[in-house]
Amino acid sequence: METTLNGTKLEVIQGDITQSSMACIVNAANSSLLGGGGVDGAIHRAGGRRILDECVRIRSERGGCPVGEAVITTGGNLKAQYVIHTVGPVWKGGKNGEAEKLGNCYRSALRLAEEHGISSLSFPNISTGIYGYPKEQAVDVAIEAVTDVLARKQAFERIQFVCFDRQNYDLYVERVGAL
């Protein structure tokens, strides 16, 4: 499913983000940047040692990555040239700034992509796995953050939402289709 917004093609697919052929994939990382479960672990496994080595270097320089911010590394063994690692919020009932923090993940990733001249990137469904963010609310935050950025600039050719599960896929198809 796809649509175009301000010159950027927005796509929704169901699949494995580690197989993306976009210039960059976004990783739903943890603040340690050392890999973990879910999409984070899958990206580290598929991308190989170079990604971890760069994450270790960033961690030693910056002390990790705070929630809502992003850092960039090589794509290692992935098809993607780059990985942008962003740390989503853990769901705590919605009264602890989770929506703002989640939106910042998407905005930070797009800002970093633009700074590095990246014109195509794939997003996973940040924070909807082990971090427990309700999928129905997370998709709204993601779409709002991305469309807000796209309304102000034409820096990207393609942005893809890669949904691992059918529920996220259906939600993204519905929301992107309504744009």
Image: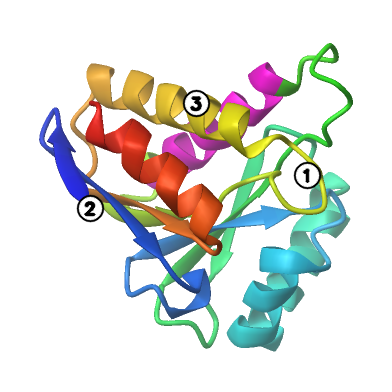
Under circle 2, the secondary element is loop
* Point 66% across, 53% down: residue: 28
Residue 129: % across, % down: 74, 53
97 and 55: which is toward the camera = 97
Q: Amino acid at mark 3?
A: Asp
Q: Is residue 111 magenta?
A: yes
Q: Is residue 24 above or below residue 157?
A: below
How far apart marks 1 and 2 lie (CA) works out to 32 Å
Side of 34 where 41 appears, left or right:
left
Between residues 54 and 178, which one lies in front from this camera angle?
178
Q: Earlier in the sequence, mark 1 or mark 2?
A: 2
Q: Which mark is residue 65?
A: 1
Residue 102's label in the rendered image is none
Observer able to see residue 71: yes
- Mark closer to the observer (3, 1): 3
Q: Quadrant of residue 154?
A: top left
Percent of width and height locating residue 158: 23, 51
Residue type indicated by callout 1:
Cys
Our reading of the magenta stretch's main secondary structure is: helix
Residue that label 3 marks: 140
- When asked about the image quadrant of residue 137, the answer is top right
Nearer-the-camera pick, 119 or 147: 147
